[in-house]
Image: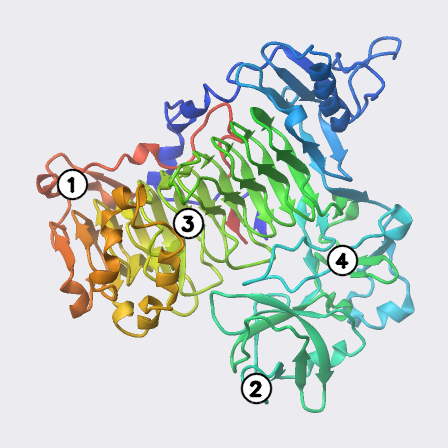
């Protein structure tokens, strides 16, 4: 959990960045295509409105015969009516939504009939400064202290007078969803019903309340589906149903939820329900159990009996001090399918089981200045299309990552131009803890810029595809629950080339488990990446190249890194099968026409890769970097033989202005400039204030 009122103390360097306002920068790219001048024709929506009215007034008239619409669906349909009547206004339409809570029981779907045009965009936005809350669930009232003796006997005696209950069926909620075997290698399932109090997610009853327990033994080998537990705590779960275990069964970078099948209290043996997926049970591996009434023993915990519909809750504060919501909607809250020039602006999306906003195809759509919180899956999923993006949003407490950004044609190397810019994404991936990053980018030619990303269990950004640009981002406190992980990660494909990672600030990142955190992890033969002008401060390992080729590590600053640069030759050793005839890397090579234009023109070094010692990490360049504190460049001898390492300043004072106070600006007489080092524009790194930012100053959170 986090405390919204507490400011996290960052380096003075970062604080200086975020106060540089106003600023001419990345936001100017959106002005010409995303309604810099709001449409003058307005349709109004209000919780006090009526769908039989005209929607032309922001509030009802004196005799209560006309005023705003009541629902967003009615406003959406009015756009279609205007088009059918050929009365769609020049300059477009604004759907202006008055403040209040708007429960959504089904997806608000926009299609080609609701699409705008360049000169006539459609903007859905909050009215003035009013708070518009789109809720994919329902407010729950009527809690009473639990007096059911059969239930109380299953609880610890010390907590029995603290548990409240409510009948969800009596409040019209009959679909409770279900828990799924989600996690590594699993599909993106909707979350089951969740509970939110004071705009924060509550904890499904679990044991232990924090941290992990360890497997004590494996009676049938690693893949037997059974393990031995220590102590006697699971003995009390014999009467419980639908118990789940969340675990890192094998690897510290792969979590999974599996369902408990049986407990043998004599042998202290737990059997899990097939299919097991990827886990192999090993002594000492970590897990916890959840969805157990008997473990409802801490403030903020809750449990739902899916048979009776009774929900049990220990509120962390008086129920009079906030509202309680239960999530219901499993499909996207808003879907933009085959539309263009539509903007969603200044709206809050919350308390839903699925993804908040889905955008499929077409172009020039914008999600701007919105708040996404308490989401079951993703905040925004952009599937293809061009020049569509997410700008200035606050995204936190999501179940399965933040933004998925795809688009572009890899076969023809045509860029999409989709973007995620100036977003504050934190405390993400509450449910699936691995491979659900703050931003996943794929396809060709998309951009991630000026985002602040922090407090996540695994990677911050997952990169797939070609010629993406990742720049001016600040990233800290990710990789918090895993190991052998990358803050920015790409790998497993020789052909994903042309990506540029520049002018980012990475700091205070240390993974607690095996092999730690690699900040830029070019894993498993990732190749052809440019890493330029980044700052790495107080991290485990700055840049790690796992057997890849043709990567350029240039003009970066490494400060107090345990290891700055690390390159291995795994293709010549333990991972040699990956580059054999039927190995993974060569299969990926055959998925694209790499020997023909435009591939052969853009990536000439890829054309003859199979004839040029494919096992060797050839063509990597490490030059013009500054290093101070920690180990510099760690290269095995056979890597040094095929790597260029030149003009790096590692054994002299680089000439920082005032490093003791976090000022890493180089003095004019710095020896780095004589080597050819280029200044890093630190004043353009991080969040910036403009009309599309959801909040300013952006609140900085710290973990409790």
Residue 1 in view, yes or no: yes
Q: Closer to the N terminus: mark 3 or mark 1?
A: 3
Q: Is residue 85 left or right of residue 498?
A: right
Q: Are marks 1 and 2 in contact (CB under 8 Å)?
A: no
To which quarter of the image does residue 68 belong?
Answer: top right
Q: Closer to the N terminus: mark 2 or mark 4?
A: 2
Alpha-carbon span between mark 3 and mark 1: 27 Å
- Residue 183 in the image: state x and y as whole percent: 58, 62
- Residue matched to label 4: 314
Alpha-carbon span between mark 1 and mark 4: 58 Å
Alpha-carbon span between mark 4 and mark 3: 41 Å
Q: Which mark is residue 463?
A: 3
Q: Are marks 3 and 2 in contact (CB under 8 Å)?
A: no
Q: Are marks 3 and 1 in contact (CB under 8 Å)?
A: no
- Residue matched to label 2: 218
Q: Closer to the N terminus: mark 1 or mark 2?
A: 2
Residue drawn at x 23%, y 56% is 608
Query: Is 421 drawn above or below residue 613 in the view shown?
Result: above
Residue 4 in view, yes or no: no
- Residue matched to label 1: 677
**Secondary structure beneath label 1:** loop
**Secondary structure beneath label 2:** loop
- Residue 497 in the image: state x and y as whole percent: 32, 48
């Amino acid at each position: 959990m986090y405390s919204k009122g507490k400011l996290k103390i960052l380096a003075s360097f970062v604080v200086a960045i975020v106060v540089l306002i106003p600023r001419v920068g990345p936001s100017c790219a959106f002005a010409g295509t995303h309604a810099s001048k709001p449409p003058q024709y307005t349709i109004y929506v209000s919780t006090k409105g009526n769908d039989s009215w005209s929607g032309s007034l922001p509030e009802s008239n004196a005799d209560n015969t006309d005023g705003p619409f009541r629902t967003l669906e009615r406003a959406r349909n009015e756009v279609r009516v205007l088009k059918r009547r050929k009365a769609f206004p020049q300059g477009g339409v604004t759907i202006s939504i008055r403040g209040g809570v708007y429960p959504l029981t089904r997806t608000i779907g926009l299609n080609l009939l609701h699409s705008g045009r360049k000169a006539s965009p459609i903007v859905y936005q909050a009215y003035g400064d009013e708070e518009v809350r789109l809720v994919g669930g329902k407010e729950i009232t009527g809690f009473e202290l639990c007096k059911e003796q059969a239930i109380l006997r299953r609880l610890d005696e010390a907590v029995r007078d603290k548990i409240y209950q409510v009948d969800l069926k009596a409040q019209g909620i009959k679909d409770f969803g279900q828990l799924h075997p989600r996690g590594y290698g699993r599909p993106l399932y909707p979350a089951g019903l969740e509970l939110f109090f004071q705009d924060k997610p509550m904890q499904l009853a679990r044991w232990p309340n924090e941290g992990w327990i360890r497997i004590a033994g494996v009676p049938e080998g690693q893949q037997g589906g059974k393990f031995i537990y220590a102590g006697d705590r699971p003995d009390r779960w014999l009467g419980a149903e639908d118990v789940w275990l969340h675990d890192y069964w094998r690897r510290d970078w792969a979590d999974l939820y599996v369902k408990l099948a049986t407990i043998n209290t004599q042998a202290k043996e737990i059997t899990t329900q097939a299919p097991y997926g990827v886990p192999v049970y090993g002594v000492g591996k970590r897990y916890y159990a959840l969805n157990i009434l008997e473990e409802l023993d801490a403030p903020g915990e809750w449990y739902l009996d899916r048979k009776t519909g009774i929900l049990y809750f220990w509120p962390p504060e008086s129920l009079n001090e906030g509202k309680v919501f239960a999530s219901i909607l499993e499909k996207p809250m808003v879907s933009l399918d085959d539309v263009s020039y539509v903007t969603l602006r200044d709206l809050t999306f919350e308390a839903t089981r699925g993804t908040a906003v889905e955008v499929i195809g077409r172009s020039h759509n914008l999600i701007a200045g919105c708040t996404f919180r308490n989401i079951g899956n993703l905040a925004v999923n952009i599937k293809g299309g061009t020049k569509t993006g997410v700008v200035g949003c606050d995204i936190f407490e999501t179940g399965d990552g933040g933004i998925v950004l795809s688009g572009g044609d890899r076969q023809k190397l045509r860029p999409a131009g989709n973007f995620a810019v100036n977003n504050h994404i934190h405390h993400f991936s509450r449910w699936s803890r691995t491979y659900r990053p703050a931003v996943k980018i794929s396809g060709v030619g998309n951009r991630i810029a000026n985002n602040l990303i922090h407090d996540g269990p695994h990677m911050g950004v997952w990169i797939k595809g070609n010629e993406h640009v990742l720049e001016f981002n600040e990233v800290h406190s990710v990789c918090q629950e895993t190991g052998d992980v990358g803050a920015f990660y790409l790998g497993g494909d020789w052909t994903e080339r042309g990506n540029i990672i520049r002018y980012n600030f990475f700091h205070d990142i240390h993974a607690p488990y095996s092999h730690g955190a690699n900040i830029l992890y070019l894993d498993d033969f990732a190749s052809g990446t440019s890493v330029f002008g980044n700052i790495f401060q107080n991290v485990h390992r700055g840049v790690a190249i796992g057997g890849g080729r043709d990567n350029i590590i240039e003009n970066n600053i490494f400060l107090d890194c345990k290891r700055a640069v690390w390159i291995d030759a795994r293709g010549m050793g333990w991972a040699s099968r990956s580059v054999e005839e039927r190995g993974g890397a060569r299969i990926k090579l055959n998925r694209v026409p790499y020997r023909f234009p435009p591939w052969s023109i853009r990536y000439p070094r890829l054309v003859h890769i199979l004839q040029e010692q494919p096992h060797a990490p050839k063509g990597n360049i490490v030059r013009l970097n500054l290093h101070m504190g920690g180990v510099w460049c760690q290269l095995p001898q056979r890597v040094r033989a095929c790597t260029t390492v030149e003009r790096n300043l590692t054994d002299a004072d680089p000439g920082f202005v005032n490093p003791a106070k976090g000022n890493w600006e180089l003095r004019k007489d710095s020896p780095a400039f004589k080597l050819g080092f280029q200044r890093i524009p630190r004043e353009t790194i991080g969040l910036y204030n403009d009309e599309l930012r959801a909040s300013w100053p952006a609140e900085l959170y710290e973990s409790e």
